Image (cartoon, rainbow, N blue to C red):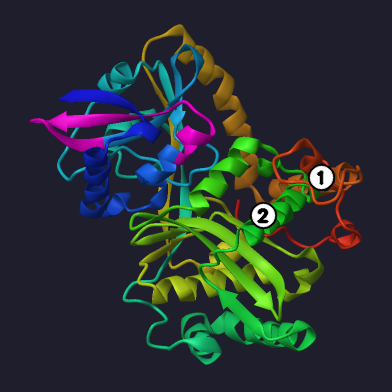
Amino acid sequence: MKITNHRAEELSTPLLDAWHRTMKESPDYGNPFLAPEFAAGVGRSRGGARVAVLHERGEPVGFFPYERTAFGVGRAVGLGLSDCQALVHRPGVSWDAGELLRACGLSVLEFDHLVEAQEPFGRYVTGTFASPVVDLEDGVGAAAGDGADGYAEWLRATYPGLAKTTLKKERRLGRDLGEMRFVFDERDPAMLRRLMRWKSAQYRRTSRMDRFARPWIVDLVESLFQVREEQFTGVLSVVYAGDRPVAAHFGPMSSTVFAAWFTAYDPELRYYSPGLLMHLRMAEAAGRAGVRVLDLGRGDKEYKDWLKTRELRVAEGFVTRPHPVATAHRLWRRPVRGLRNTVLAHPGLRKQADRLLKTVGTVRTRGSAPAGARPGSRAEGARPESRSESRSKGAAARGH
């Protein structure tokens, strides 16, 4: 087997077409995070993104996106942001993990959301985790029709346990602020920027790493928002009450899979459960659009237990070749992952950690910065929360 390497953002049109065909041929690889558009976006925004192309009899049959850092340390492309990682290949294609790493010039490759079908990587897996999904096959929601009545009918049929409470909150929100309106594919970039500001405030409020304080992530999201391809479309969805945005979500969508990614809401409206309202609206709209699966991503969250229809399994681990750099990297990274996974696996520890992080977050958000600073700038990272945000003690918005 011949393996060639390419910059992710410089793939030729024939290779892009072959990659898209491969995604269609193999249902396990239909996730938009496995599309060439995502790898190219990371390459343009951060640099270092590569694609190993596997060839048989002169034909491209597999595509492996990765990032190469110093000393031959590699990671799955978008590690820490991507909810799905794999070598995308045509049915029946086999490969050797060691040969792949040698062809890529890597001593070690780290992954944390590897799809279950990647058998050549199996012996390098250090843990597997549930990744909940919502099945939307047969155009769920289409039979209910469009508009508020159609949505209510779909909600009662699909989630009878949630329907009464959810519809009551939506009616109350409509009475308080104005008629409810959901836009599945909002094209206003100002709304995307508002979502990032909301999410930055949530990260600081809960003492998580503020992803949108990193300019390359802001650039990545803004560039993916512009992509409109069959196997990858950046979809911004917004719930409005009257003219006021209530909640927003941005995530990638392929022809078959819609990935839940960044969700946030106006913290003043937390008592209306806007994060849950957003996910229910997204599921109904995606089903009407013909999408088969809403991928909620790895992680234990109450709303995921409410919404999921089944679970996939994703893996984390380190593919290595005999090399001192590989040994050092594994010894450094594995204990960190192990400690995090131990906390996440025990509800009591997880709740204590969440309480501690929220307390720290309250202290962190008492700084000051010019209002309206752009996400990704130093000023935005230190932007003070509004009075309503400082008072907020509710649950964090769902998503990354």
Q: In this view, does 185 lie above or below 327?
A: below
At a point 60% along the width and 36% down the height, the residue shown is 216
Q: Are marks 1 and 2 in contact (CB under 8 Å)?
A: no
Q: Distance between the residues labelled 1 and 2?
A: 29 Å
Q: Badge 1: how crowded within 10 Å, few (<14), some, or many (20+)?
A: few
Corner quadrant of residue 187: bottom right
Instruction: Please name the amino acid that badge 2 sits on.
Output: Arg
Does the rendering let one see residue 115?
no
Q: Specify start and end residues of the magenta stretch as a single range.
A: 41-62
* Residue corresponding to mark 2: 193
* Residue corresponding to mark 1: 356
At a point 77% along the width and 51% down the height, the residue shown is 201
At a point 74% along the width and 53% down the height, the residue shown is 202
Q: Does the magenta portion include 391?
A: no
Q: Is residue 88 above or below residue 54?
A: below
- Left or right, 92 with respect to 202, comes to left
Q: Which of marks 1 and 2 is nearer the N terminus?
A: 2
Q: Does the magenta portion include 56?
A: yes
